[in-house]
Image (cartoon, helix red, strand yellow):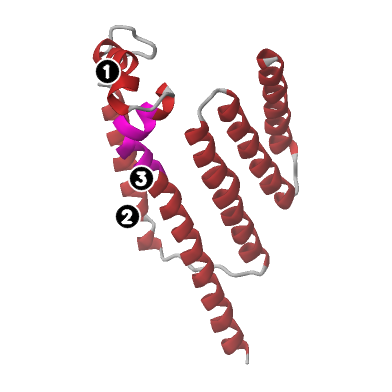
Amino acid sequence: MSLLLNTVLLVFLLVTAFAVMRVKVLLAMVMLFGLYSLLVSSLFVVLDAPDVAFTEAAVGTGISTVLMLVTLAAVRHGHSAPIKPGKRALPLLLSLAMGSLVIFGIQDLPAFGDSQSPAYQQVAKHYIEKGVDETGVPNLVTAVLASYRGFDTLGEVTVVLTAGIGVLLLLGRREKVHLKARRNDE
């Protein structure tokens, strides 16, 4: 049953990804991106990663789709902020610097799936052997997420909250731009 469900989700993901590449209407593309994120979220649920599924559903399906729709609506109404030539250099430099830092940091990571990496040698063994006893939680995954990895889970919640606040701020700013444009037209 699990194999069938995984296969069906994979087929839907592939069809949706292909449809996103082929569609010409921007609104349909935004909706397909939302569907794709929802399917990825469903896949995480099937793979027993509900915390990742929740984050993907909230950020990928919800917030990203809303941001794309707001952007699409703003572009259709002809609102554009003129960008001065000197203002493009700083974001470009920051992006290149961050990209370089990420590439530099990746060099120190162990090879993917390396059974000799420190995470597999010490921490995982401790979680499996003593997780239920030390936390008192019968489900090992919940024990790890809530007790040992509590700050990681708090970080995920913070990401979702920050993204939500960002969307609210952008929507509020957009309404101010509309009001300012109406006042200028009158």
Residue tagged 3:
95
**Can you tell which mark lies on residue 123?**
1
The single residue placed furthest to the top in the displayed view is: 116
Give 132 or 4, whichever is nearer the viewer.
Answer: 132
Give the amino acid at mark 1.
Val
Give the magenta-colored segment's residue range. 143-156
Residue at the outermost bottom position: 186
* Along the viewing direction, whichever of 94 and 118 lies nearer the viewer: 118
Label pair 2/1, CB-CB below 8 angstroms: no
- Give the Cα distance between marks 1 and 3: 34 Å
Give above or below for 9 relative to 146: above
Residue drawn at the location 28% of the way across and 12% of the way down? 117
Residue at 58% x, 29% y: name it: 45
Give the left or right position of residue 58, taking residue 84 as reference. right
For the N terminus, the quadrant is top right
Is label 1 in a helix, a strand or a loop? Answer: helix
Q: Is residue 145 above or below residue 120?
A: below
Question: Which element is circle 2 on?
Answer: helix
Q: Residue 182, labelled with which disc?
A: none
Q: Where is residue 98 in the image (x, y as percent from the top left)?
A: 31, 41
Q: Quadrant of residue 7?
A: top right
- Type of amino acid at the residue the image marks with label 3: Ser
The image position of residue 153, as x and y in percent, is: 37, 38
x then y, percent, for residue 12? 72, 28
Viewer-side residue, 60 vs 157: 157
- Which residue, given by chain and number where applicable, does mark 2 sit on? 90
Relative side of 183 to 104, left or right: right
How many marks the image carries: the answer is 3
Q: Would you say the magenta stretch is mainly helix, strand or loop?
A: helix
CA gap between label 2 and label 3 equals 9 Å
